[in-house]
Amino acid sequence: MDWAVFLVAAAAILAGALGVVTSRNPVHAALNLVLTLFGVAVLFVAQQAHFLAVVQVIVYAGAIVVLFLFVIMLLGVDQAENLDVEPLAGQRPAAVGLGLAGLACLLLPIAFGRWEWLSGASSVVGPARSTTEPNVNLLAKALFTRYLLPFEATSVLLVIAVIGAVVLARRPLSSERTGETVREEP
């Protein structure tokens, strides 16, 4: 049964990931991302990591993807664009070069047998079951002590991204386009 659950979840993750990359419509890409995140949550449940599965569904599949959809709809990027016009010359070759460099960073350590940093080694924060304290408490202590600054920096970055998207997507009022001032009646 474990193999069946793993294979179904892995197939869902791969299908969703391929859908994210190959979708032309950004809304469909975001929905494929939800499929991928749900598949990862199933794998967490299979590993008895129920807290991480719930966080995966609530935070990522719920909040983050809704945020992505909000920004996509707000910016109107689901409209067709001319892909023949490249505003930044050299952008595609640079992306291919960076992608190949990232792939080399992943594959070279494996080829030389030094891949512990890729897999996370045995544990980054400490042993999960060394005490009688639950894993959620250990995770909370690590997150809100040692990793508090990156955690808060990520939240500030998300807020700045949303504010930036709203400012960029804001369409001026008709009175602002013509230069007229609007007086409010008391």
Image: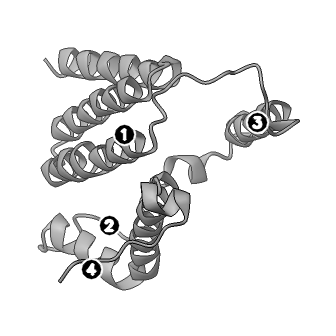
Element type where label 3 sits in the image: helix
Q: Residue at x 28, y 33 (%)?
A: 34
Residue corresponding to mark 3: 95
For the residues bearing labels 1 and 2, Cβ distance under 8 angstroms: no
Residue 157 image offset from top left, x and y in percent: 47, 68
Distance of label 3 from label 4 (alpha carbons): 38 Å
Q: Residue at x 44, y 37 (%)?
A: 76
For the residues bearing labels 3 and 4, Cβ distance under 8 angstroms: no
Q: Is residue 166 above or below residue 19?
A: below
| Label whose residue precedes the other's in the sequence (3 or 1) | 1
Residue corresponding to mark 1: 73
Distance of label 1 from label 4 (alpha carbons): 37 Å
Left or right of residue 98, residue 165 in this image: left
Instruction: Determine the image quadrant of residue 134.
Output: bottom left
Left or right of residue 53, residue 91 in this image: right
Residue type for callout 3: Ala
Q: How busy is the neighbourhood of tag 2: few (under 14 within 10 Å), some, or many (20 plus)?
A: few
Q: Of discs 1 and 2, which sits in the foreground?
A: 1
Residue corresponding to mark 4: 141
Q: Of discs 4 and 2, which sits in the foreground?
A: 4
Left or right of residue 73, residue 59 in this image: left
| Label whose residue precedes the other's in the sequence (1 or 2) | 1
Q: Which of the numbered marks, if any, corresponds to residue 127?
A: 2
Residue 88 image offset from top left, x and y in percent: 82, 40
Instruction: Determine the image quadrant of residue 14.
Output: top left
Distance of label 1 from label 2 (alpha carbons): 43 Å
Q: How busy is the neighbourhood of tag 1: few (under 14 within 10 Å), some, or many (20 plus)?
A: some
